[in-house]
Image (spheres, coloured by chain):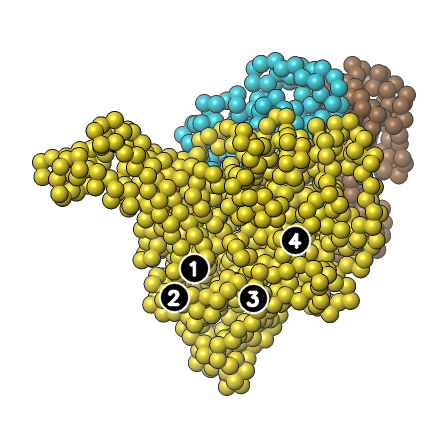
Amino acid sequence: MKIKEYRQPDSLKEAYKLINENKKAMLVAGGAYLRLQKREIPLAVDLSGLGLDYIIEENGCLKIGAMTTLRSIEVDDYCIGELNGVLSNMVRQIASLQLRNIVTIGGSICGKYSFSDMLPTLIVLDSTLRFYKAGEMSMDDYLEMDLKNDILLEIIIDLKQVANVKYLKKTYKEYSLINVALAKKDDRYRIAVGARPGRGTYAKLASKILTTEKDIDKACEILIEELSFNDDYRVSEDYRKSITQTLLKEAYKEMVV
Amino acid sequence: MSVNQNIPKVDGLGLVTGKPAYTDDLAPKDALIVKVLRSPYAYAKIKCINTDKALKVKGISLILTHKNVPDAVYTRAGQGSPEPSPYDKKILDEYVRYIGDEVAVVAGINASVVDEAINKISVEYELLEPVLDYEKAIGHSSKVHDPDHGKVMFDIGRDASKNIAASYAMEINNVEDEFEKSDYYYEDVYYTQAQAHTMSEPHAAYAYLDLQDRLNVVTSTQTPFHVRRILGKTLGIPLSKIRVFKPRIGGGYGGKQFIHGEFFVSLVTLQTKKPCKLIYTRKEVFEATNSRHPMRIKMRIGAMADGMMNAIEMKILSNTGAYGEHSLTVLMVAGSKTLPLYNKVKAVKFSGHVVYTNTTPAGAFRGYGAIQGNFALESAISEMANMVGIDPIEFRRMNMIKENETSEIFEVMGEGTEGTAQMIESCKLEECIEIVKEKINWEEKYPFKKIDENTVRSVGMAIAMQGSGIPYIDMGSAVLKLNDDGFFNLQVGATDLGTGSDTVLAQIAAEVLQVTTDKIIVYSSDTDQTPYDVGAYASSTTYVSGNSVYLTAMAMLDALKEKAKQVLKVDEISYKKGVFASGDKSISLVDLSNELFYGEDMKQLVVSESYYGKKSPPPYMACACEVEINEATGVLKVLECVASVDCGVTLNPNLAKIQVEGALVQGLGMALTEQANRGSKGQLYNNTFLNYGGPTKMDFGKLDVSFVDSYEPSGPFGAKSVGEIGIDTPPAVISNAIKNAIGHRMKVLPMTSERIWQMINQ
Amino acid sequence: MIAITLNINDRDYEVMVHGGEMLVDTLRGLGFTSVKKGCDTGSCGVCSILMDGKVIPSCSLFTMKAQDHKILTIDGIEEKAREIGQFLLEEGVDQCGFCTPGLIMSIVAMAEDLDVYTEESIKHYLVGNLCRCTGYEGQLRAIKRYLEVS
């Protein structure tokens, strides 16, 4: 990646101004994925040092700043102890320790990567995203729209739930070939599947079936119809569909116990 | 005592603490940056290439295209002359034959301007129909190489009009007759993939002109002498005007046994008179260096009801990609370093074609055909054992080669040429099998155990052989120079890839001279300063280079004794641990050396001996794995991998162990996860560490490697090779374990979880 | 090009950098050739260095981000590197050596970071340090011995 000008603003206000003045400007979170792109950008705006690196508990919610690294999440007491430990468990198998010391939760979300394990996890946890200009919105809504020129500040997650993420990988370090996330809040289930190869997507119908009928087999059947699965050079559509069902049943079994 | 000791590598501490040692560390700071414009098409003719705009970029020194480089053909294979590989490569060609093939070479003052210039080169391609499926190459309407161009050094069965790079066939007695007579007959086809080396250090080379205006090339290579010869002959430069030096290199495994960037840096330096360097990106290493020959192997076996095999046939189609480096030799090794395991058959037949395709060229890679052949053979052997109804270990015991036996194949099949008959003077396969059988707990675990509804565990095993250098072809030599203060310089052409060969060779010399290893200072792999060695391949370093060091050290000892006799004025002399003695007279090595430098009758003692093998004593190995398979997902976990190796005497047990452990993991990767998938246009999908599938620490269980007591009379201090043997068995071991677990035979590598799942759900 | 100051091994360096320059290139340009380049994707670990005590892939960090932080390469911990290196040598796992400086930096960080050392936790911490030569088993033996002794 070639960058003409690299700025490290002192305030969010300045950062926001910079990316709106130059529509071709890009925000830099960790930068590890960004630098892989073969592009030339006129302006990079670094969000370090703007106080977006934190994990706190407030009013029964977990609030994670967008610039919090995956490693910080991995070792954080709340992320380990709450939500069935899903946040720590999910990040600890991503890439390598080295990369997790750089990659941020914000960068992982806004990249909307198809292989992301983060996306389906945050989807099923019904996370709320807070943006500088646009304010709060649900994860589901954010993924529907194409929000530009705004800055993700924080992710808010209700702690009164449990969740589980399962995935299939070729080797430990590589991206998931398929990932399945399941969350339970009170009596309500949410299911999301990613790397299909399509990115993490909420399975509304399947989640409803599981919630209302508690029938995992039926939910699985609906799930593979509801979401789109495809072949790619890694694995086939059929395999993805089969594994999705196996992983969901596993996740459900562990949650029920 | 140095031999059979865990002497730490002599260059160890410097390397691990990051001292500058590798090609890119040593390149001059002001070296021009050289980069390559590569073809985006699998097969095309360059109709027109325009570098005008690119040359105008400030800071660009030179751009090479097929129009301004020598037109000569050569082979990039790092092999001795005359090479058994076809001369089908030009430095830059009018035709590009795979996605990644070189189109233009740009040199400039920094990476930025070079990148800019590369983007400004305009190329007009005429697209041609690529040959992408190697099973359709023979008879394909598209010819990867013009049959009228290119040449061979001797007949290797090349027929470019059929896209055949090389062919070979041999038969001992008549297999069809024997199949007729057999009670049981087995036949099936196996497939292996284009495994990539993924060595830590990407390929790198730099060049400069020295004070004598000679071309100096410093390169990450396994074969410095071959590089010098190929450069000189192809560029028409006297070899006396070229020096090639190998610094420390970050891994090879065969991946640096060919010419990579050396021509480009040479031409740039020769024309600009400036130093320059070319460092490959990882993507270039995946796409545009070489990888393992994918093979389709047909196995046929006939056996009697008592379990004795009558005949084996192995028939191979091998894919050498766009250029034919190592094509014939890898094909032959697939048979010559596997079939002699079963020397009791009455007839054996081996044949194959190596075909060109428009994909990344294949080349040398640890195992060098033996791993592909072993996968097919050892899977087929277990299938036959199953058919006959005999335990697979027993079946192997009955049919396998033993000490003081031979196989006719040794005489018939060499590596590119005829072979050399040899009696097997050391073979501990029996002991190796016993050890792995016990350690893995075969009796209890074979064939499988159901753990729960979806989980099954099983064991599988296989045996393997390799070689120790190529007889009458691989030559190594050494020079020993005595210094004052009683220490020695040992100069060897032998190429340490990181294996520790410098250390092992020092140990050999130290053992003969009865000094500690730190008194032997090794300098290696410099065509100016060290004597010739073929380089690190064919598992030749310990055996061939080692023997040359042994002979040289013995010659030095003789010379020292002669001088000691003169100095002490005696007729007889004996030597023990640094002291020459005769009666009550004695002189230490240290004093003798100083006497020779500063005393009365001064002389600098320098000796040199060479060695080439008259045989290639195989190391042997048995390996067994316990695996656990999830039948719902097809995911296979290797719980434990046990290996027992006979490599003669282990000159350095630690280093030998690491060689085998490292090779085993490479073999497991080939067996389970390493993929080189291509799209419909011939593009390589698995071209980064994000998706290639190399095994990590977390991807397999325990490794247990041990060595049996063995002694090879023809090897230095009883040693055979150990560099390659470790890689050969895992694919067959895992395929056998899977068969034992789920009753299906996996015949295609890699045996991914999806493929296992498909097998289960069939 | 912009002039910045980097603190490397406890010393300040003034450098001119491009906006999109990665730390590994800046470090190697300053003569720290102990920091290696092995891949294009931040996946292999040979470029590992410590930034404020955390092990990071220097190939994936924009140099601009490294300002106001403490960078440590293996050159800055010579004695400790030799100490750990000695354990690696004794197992023979200093093979081609290319992955080793990055591995040693990661071991240094791990020794501070981990409370409990099991084989599993060691392997997990170091999974980003790829090695093609040794098969990892020997490295694990050496590291366990080092952790026991230190």
Specify the subunit that label 1 lies on. B
Q: Is residue B382 above or below residue A31?
A: below
The C terminus of chain B is located in which quarter? bottom right
Q: Which residue bears the numbered disc 4?
A: B73
Give percent across and percent down for residue B43.
Answer: 77, 55
Task: Report how far apart the C-alphas of labels 4 and 2 lie in the structure.
Answer: 37 Å
Q: Nearer the viewer, mark 3 or mark 4?
A: 4
| Contact, mark 2 vs mark 3 (Cβ under 8 Å) | no
Q: In the figure, what tint was chain B given?
A: yellow
Q: Which residue bears the numbered disc 3?
A: B376
Disc with the residue nearer the chain's start (1 vs 4): 4
Q: Nearer the viewer, mark 1 or mark 4?
A: 4
Q: Nearer the viewer, mark 2 or mark 1?
A: 1
Q: Nearer the viewer, mark 4 or mark 2?
A: 4
Asked whether the residues under marks 2 and 3 belong to the same chain, the reply is yes
Q: Which residue shows up at 81% across the image and 47% down it?
A: A198
Q: Nearer the viewer, residue B385 or B725?
A: B725
Q: Nearer the viewer, residue B233 or B386?
A: B233
The brown one among the chains is A
The amino acid sitting under disc 2 is Gln
Q: Nearer the viewer, residue B106 or B193?
A: B106
The amino acid sitting under disc 1 is Pro
The N terminus of chain B is located in which quarter? top left
Disc with the residue nearer the chain's start (3 vs 1): 3
The amino acid sitting under disc 3 is Ala
